[in-house]
Amino acid sequence: MKYLNEVHGSKVCPACGKDLEADDIYEHFLKIGFSEVEALDKASMFGWTKETPKRFGRCIGVETSGYDGVSWWLCPYCETAWKRFEWSDSKEIADMPFPKEMRHE
């Protein structure tokens, strides 16, 4: 998600336009019952600080064989997939070759 946000300035799906940002990480841990100290400790594991708060993302990172890390992003709403390092501002995202084993056909 970091790559999508920082490089492309987008926090929405390029196909359906739905928001891909989720809860503030610190607020999430408070919401599920952690104390303020515990929530801060847990949130810091994700790089969250008071000066640089971070949010969870709804975008699904997909790993494929041959690379140890996210190769594709997948929108949980419309299931559009796009390559992590080959962003396209065109509307031809659906034409990008998504690995056959990951397609819903």
Image (cartoon, helix red, strand yellow):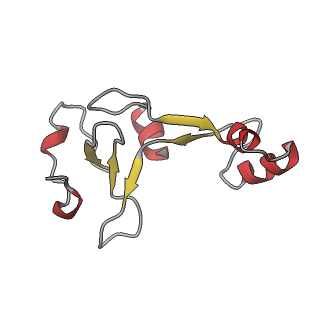
Q: Is residue 24 visible?
A: yes
Q: Out of 89 and 31, give the one closest to the viewer.
A: 31
On screen, residue 37 versus residue 51, left or right, reads right
5 lies above or below 3: above
Q: Residue furthest top?
A: 17
Residue at position x 49%, y 45% from top?
2
Locate residue 90, reporting x and y percent. 19, 31
86 lies above or below 67: above
Q: Residue furthest bottom?
A: 66
Q: Out of 9 and 16, give the one closest to the viewer.
A: 16
Q: Is residue 84 visible?
A: no
Locate residue 80, reporting x and y percent. 25, 41
Locate residue 20, reporting x and y percent. 44, 35
Residue 48 occupies which quadrant of the picture? top right
71 lies above or below 5: below
On screen, residue 51 versus residue 15, left or right, reads right
Residue at position x 46%, y 41% from top?
58
Residue 87 occupies which quadrant of the picture? top left
Image label count: 0
Residue at position x 34%, y 49% from top?
73
Locate residue 89, reporting x and y percent. 25, 32
Residue 16 occupies which quadrant of the picture? top left
Q: Out of 88 and 18, give the one closest to the viewer.
A: 18
Residue at position x 78%, y 45% from top?
33
On screen, residue 28 versus residue 84, left or right, reads right
